[in-house]
Image (cartoon, helix red, strand yellow):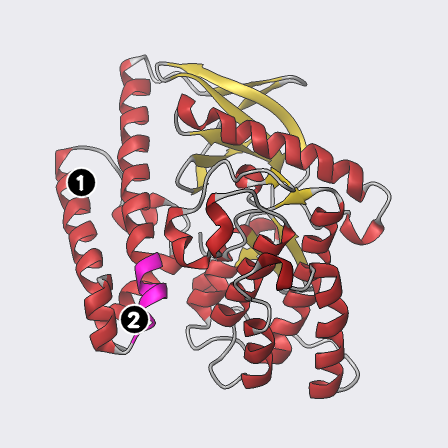
Amino acid sequence: MNPTQEAQLEVLAARTASDLFGENDGDRSRRAALRTLRRLRAQLHPDRARAAGVDVGEATSAFVTVGDWHAAWLQDGATGARAAADGGTTAVVHGRRRDWTVGAQVAGGTWSTLYAADGAVAKIARSERANRLVAVAASSLTRLAAFAATRSWAEHGYPHLVDVGEVRGPQGRRAAVVIEDLGTGTGHVSLEQVLAAHPGGLDGRDWAWMMRRLLWLVAGAHDAGLVHGAIAPANVLIAPSDHRVVLAGWGMSTPSGGRLPARMASEAAAYPPEADGAVTGALDVWMLAHLMERMLRPDEARQRRFARGCRQTAPRMRPTAADLSAEYDDLLDRLHGPRTFRPFPMPAVARTP
């Protein structure tokens, strides 16, 4: 494994900014974090990736992610310093239903940070500028809950919205949603962690159950009138033991025909040409096909060809997620015959957040 591949795995395995940069507790840690940032960016630079025989798009995605994580790390350190100066007051999400005590950080992203909160998870905007994305997530999860209420297959396929509120403090009023805990303690891991555990890609028989369930969930969201807008490894959770799949990350969603409120900078290569304008479910189909190619082993030629067939430049030429579900089942029948439960191995290294 060359340094670029090692850097990719290091970034993919990170679940919080601290996983990459350590604790943000002073000037020494900030200097060390800057050295880590420079090292990873040097190893992931597209020119070096090309020379190392690594997929340039994936290396570029990891390159951008490192910068996002570093910005998040600096922001969280500033938040902690202000809290300490303010007497170390414990943060609280003031929800519509109740107050939620904010505990340890469990994950992070470009616009929000996730914290343990009284048995649930609080997803808190990093700044007031990101409040609108929290509002988007709350609106979409409410719509999905109504959709799933009459469809048993969708009941556990989307995050369960528990409460909506805000955190008040030196950074102003930051919006928050409280959702059910879907962390490693519940048996769930993200597809980012799956990639870190299986850097050579997945056997098509393992990817099959993930893709089938994802197609159902994406088609369901489209039936509910939503475009997800951020289908990427970080936003798909699976439970290897019983093959559950959850489609998370709804802060960048939009009603069909609308514009995306934001895009994942680290996943720039995953978006189709029309992403800057009004979008439909065809955008999700493109992103799901891109995800499929990233997850599969290079020798899974038939499934990879299936994915490429979903990425026509013109959105109207792409099949719908509902149509793809039936077509994918037909492909699996031809490739593997009758379906049977296949245990999915997850090395312990990828289970540690």
Is label 1 or label 2 in front? Answer: 2
Q: Quadrant of the N terminus?
A: bottom left
Residue count near mark 2 (Cα–Cα under 10 Å), binned few <14, some 14–19, many ≥20: some
* Residue 148 position in % (x across, y down): 79, 44
Q: Which quarter of the picture shows residue 6?
A: bottom left
Q: Position of residue 268 (x, y in %)?
A: 39, 53
- Image disc number at residue 29: 1
Tell me residue 145's x, y (percent): 75, 38
Structural crowding at the residue carrying mark 1, measured as other residues with C-alpha within 10 Å and reported as few (<14), some (14–19) or many (≥20): some
Q: Which of marks 1 and 2 is nearer the N terminus?
A: 2
Region in magenta? 54-61
Between 192 and 133, the residue placed more toward the observer is: 133
Q: Which residue is drawn at 28% across and 39% down?
A: 71
77 is higher (above) or lower (below) than 250? above
Rendering coords of residue 336 (x, y %): 71, 86
- Which amino acid lies under the numbered mark 1 shown in the image of this protein? Ser
Along the line of sight, the residue nearer the viewer: 195 or 57? 57
Does the image show residue 184?
Answer: no
- In the drawing, what numbered circle is on residue 5? 2
User: Is 198 placed left or right of 59 in the picture?
Assistant: right
Tell me the number on the disc at residue 260: none
Tag 2 secondary structure: helix
At a point 54% along the width and 85% down the height, the residue shown is: 301
At mark 1, the secondary structure is helix
